Image: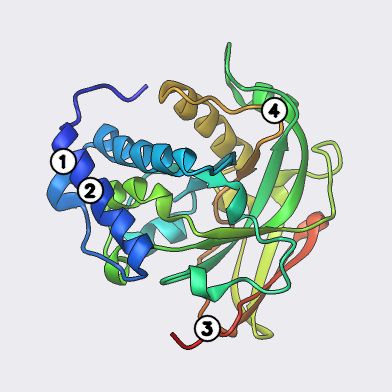
Amino acid sequence: MVTGMADAHAVARAAARLAAATREGTPVAPVRDLIGVHDLDAAYAVQQELTRRRLADGAVVVGRKIGLTSPAVQRQLGVDQPDFGVLFADMDVSAETEVPSDRLLQPKAEAEIAFVLGEDLADGDLDEDRVRAAVDHAVAAIEIVDSRVAAWDITITDTIADNASSGLFVLAGHRLTLDEFEPRETSMRMYADGEPVSEGNGAACLGDPLTALAWLARTARAYGEPLRAGQVVLSGALGPMVPAPPGTRIRAEIGALGEVEAVFSEKRDA
């Protein structure tokens, strides 16, 4: 669990800054001036405070996302390790005809594997064999990452504090168990308006998406909120993320999991 070592005043100020970006629809300055660039506990304390506020307003947690698992994405953002964020029910726009661009500030799209857990990952040795056994099924997913920080000017503490730069997500309907496909060997190709814009495979995700899931299971437990049965876990990108401005149609082909598509609405005039 996050300890009390993080400066409570700095955490509160950072949370207030990021909350203002969401409330006002305008990106803000990074929060590293308040919490530093190396204090991950402080960054997760900010994330937990923002999560607490959302839960108090009636939000429901449905899972987690793993971020910064792809070396390509790490290079894009100038960081060198993964992070995680919280998925809320209202972030799942799979049933929507269009992704609501009005809810986003600076969206980018990533093609991922979404694991749905069949059992808790709270106790014992959380190695890759254990997490494999805990996965009920997987589906193809597009994560729409977003940043409340202006111009995506982020360090790892900025993105962790900002719920790992979470936005929205889309899940496909075709389910496979881990007996039916191997995440590490899964290929990915993503298109924007019909043009190829990103490609990769499961090995781009910490060498194996199940390695990423095991990392998350251990880290989430260490921060006091272990993964639970029924939750969705977004694996992390299988290749570079791409901009997704209003009006863009993103389609991803993810091996045996099939296709998943996200059509971004045109923004309405204010």
Under mark 1, the amino acid is: Ala
Q: Is residue 201 above or below residue 260?
A: above
Q: What residue is shown with label 3?
A: 267
Instruction: Locate residue 102, reporting x and y percent.
Output: 50, 74
- Whichever of labels 3 and 2 marks the residue nearer the N terminus, that label is 2
Mark 4: which secondary structure? loop
What type is the residue that disc 2 sits on? Ala
Spatial CA span between label 4 and label 1: 34 Å
Q: Check whether the beta carbons of the residues at disc 3 and disc 2 lie within 8 A of each other.
A: no
Quadrant showing the N terminus: top left
Picture residue at 71% right of the left edge, 49% below the top: 185
| Residue 115 left/right relative to 203 | right
Tell me the element at label 3: loop
Q: Which residue is mark 2?
A: 14
Which residue is the site of mark 1?
A: 10
Dot 3: few (<14), some (14–19), or many (≥20) neighbours within 10 Å? Answer: some
Which mark is first along the chain, 1 or 3? 1
Residue 38 at least partly seen: no
x, y percent for residue 147: 38, 62
What's the amino acid at mark 4? Ala
Distance from label 4 to label 2 (Cα)? 32 Å
Tag shown at residue 229: 4
Label 3 vs label 1: CA separation?
34 Å
Give 241 or 165, whichever is nearer the viewer. 165
Q: Dot 2: what SS?
A: helix
